[in-house]
Image: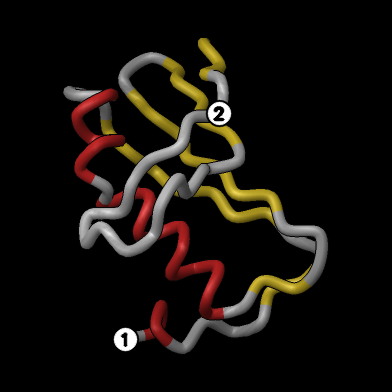
Amino acid sequence: MSLHRQRGFVSNDGFEVASRPDVLLVQHNTLLVIELKLGEARDAEYGQLARYLRNEKIASAFRGLTRHGVLTSDTHNQCTACLK
């Protein structure tokens, strides 16, 4: 298992600059992109995690690894986008 220091990644569309996943954890052939939220997780946080998982720079930096997202929070609001 290896823990990677936090790095900024420019979004694929170039609008969001230096967006940073909270934790990047590599174990075996898997990259876990972990987002930590102190309060309630809403649709915006799920979207943020999805952007990290699709990010070309992250994919390039961790080529060949299966990527999974983990969102931890105090509570989770039902994610309407996740249900589609």
Q: Which residue is mark 1?
A: 84
Q: Residue at x 39, y 60 (%)?
A: 16
Which mark, by number, is residue 6? 2
Q: Secondary structure at mark 1?
A: loop
Percent of width and height locating residue 84 = 31, 86
Name the residue nearer the viewer: 8 or 58: 8
Q: Say how the picture is coloured.
A: secondary structure
Report crowding for label 1: few under 14, some 14 to 19, many 20 or more residues within 10 A (C-alpha). few
Which three-letter amino acid code belongs to the residue tagged 2? Gln
Q: Is residue 74 left or right of residue 53?
A: right
Q: Residue at x 27, y 48 (%)?
A: 55
Above or below, 53 against 29 in this view is below
Percent of width and height locating residue 77 = 66, 82
Report crowding for label 2: few under 14, some 14 to 19, many 20 or more residues within 10 A (C-alpha). few
Which three-letter amino acid code belongs to the residue tagged 1? Lys
Above or below, 78 against 16 in this view is below
Q: Residue at x 45, y 18 (%)?
A: 27
Which mark, by number, is residue 18? none
Q: Is residue 27 left or right of residue 65?
A: right
Name the residue nearer the viewer: 13 or 66: 13
